[in-house]
């Protein structure tokens, strides 16, 4: 179910707290959109994806914290894609051992298990880039991300200069 609530009298500082609490209370996802309402008033529109059995509790929390006098419940259909998580490793072309920490990559899968999209985990890219830089490799974060995503998308090793990216393991979701 999708809950929607709009409020025009709360401070921006409370938004991260509300998002974290809703997620801890079982919301599947929370999105907050800034908007302008009547008389030029700033407001926030909250979209909360949550299981039906949690709607009352989450709505009560929103009333308590935001002072809202109502929550819209929108019945919706959600088409989910399966995905796999793989690890990308970087090694020198003439070596077999990786030279940096692994980077997790999400592979979004279609109905025939084909890869529709890949995305390297940003939090993993930075330590990998730092390790490569310490070893004298001059590579931009953007180039590293592209190289890793190419390997994850193609299912084959991807190379740039002396560096080779290869994929290990798969964890289906």
Image: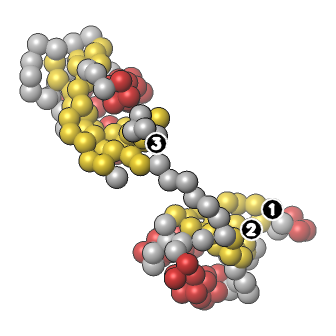
Find disc 2 in the rendering and name its residue. 43
Q: Is residue 138 visible?
A: no
Residue position marked by numbered label 1 in the rendering: 36
- Mark nearest the camera among 2 and 3 is 3
111, 89: nearer the viewer = 111
Residue in the picture at 33% in, 39% down: 105
Query: Residue 32 location in percent, x, y?
Result: 63, 63
Task: Provide residue 130's location: percent of width, then percent of height.
Answer: 25, 33
Question: Residue drawn 66% across and 70% down?
Answer: 75
- For the N terminus, the image quarter is bottom right
Q: Is residue 119 left or right of residue 33?
A: left
Front: mark 1 or 3: 3
Separation of marks 1 and 3 at Cα, in angstroms: 40 Å
Determine crowd level at label 1: few under 14, some 14-19, many 20+ residues with C-alpha closer than 10 A. Answer: few
The image shows a total of numbered marks equal to 3
> Do residues under tags 1 and 2 come within 8 Å of each other at their CB atoms?
yes
What kind of element bears circle 1? strand
Identify whether 3 is placed above or below 121. below
Which residue is drawn at the image coordinates 26% and 47% (left, top)? 171
Residue 93 vertical position relative to residue 57 in the rendered view, above or below = above
The residue that mark 3 highlights is 111
- Nearest to N terminus: mark 1 or mark 3: 1
Q: Position of residue 132 (x, y in %)?
A: 22, 27
Q: Residues within 10 Å of mark 2 (few under 14, many from 20)?
A: many
Corner quadrant of residue 98: top left
Q: Residue furthest left?
A: 96
């Amino acid at each position: 179910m999708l809950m929607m609530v709009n409020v025009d009298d709360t401070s921006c500082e409370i938004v991260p707290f509300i998002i974290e609490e809703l997620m801890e209370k079982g919301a599947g996802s929370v999105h907050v959109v800034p908007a302008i309402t009547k008389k030029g008033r700033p407001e926030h529109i909250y979209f909360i994806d949550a299981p039906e059995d949690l709607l009352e509790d989450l709505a009560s929390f929103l009333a308590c914290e935001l002072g809202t006098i109502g929550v819209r419940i929108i019945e919706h259909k959600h088409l989910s894609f399966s995905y796999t998580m793989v690890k990308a490793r970087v090694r020198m072309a003439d070596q077999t051992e990786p030279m940096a920490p692994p980077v997790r990559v999400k592979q979004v899968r279609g109905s025939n298990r084909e890869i529709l999209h890949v995305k390297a985990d940003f939090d993993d890219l930075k330590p990998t880039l730092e390790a490569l830089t310490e070893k004298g490799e001059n590579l931009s974060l953007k180039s590293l991300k592209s190289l890793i995503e190419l390997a994850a998308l193609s299912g084959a090793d991807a190379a740039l200069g002396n560096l080779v990216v290869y994929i290990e393991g798969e964890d289906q979701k």
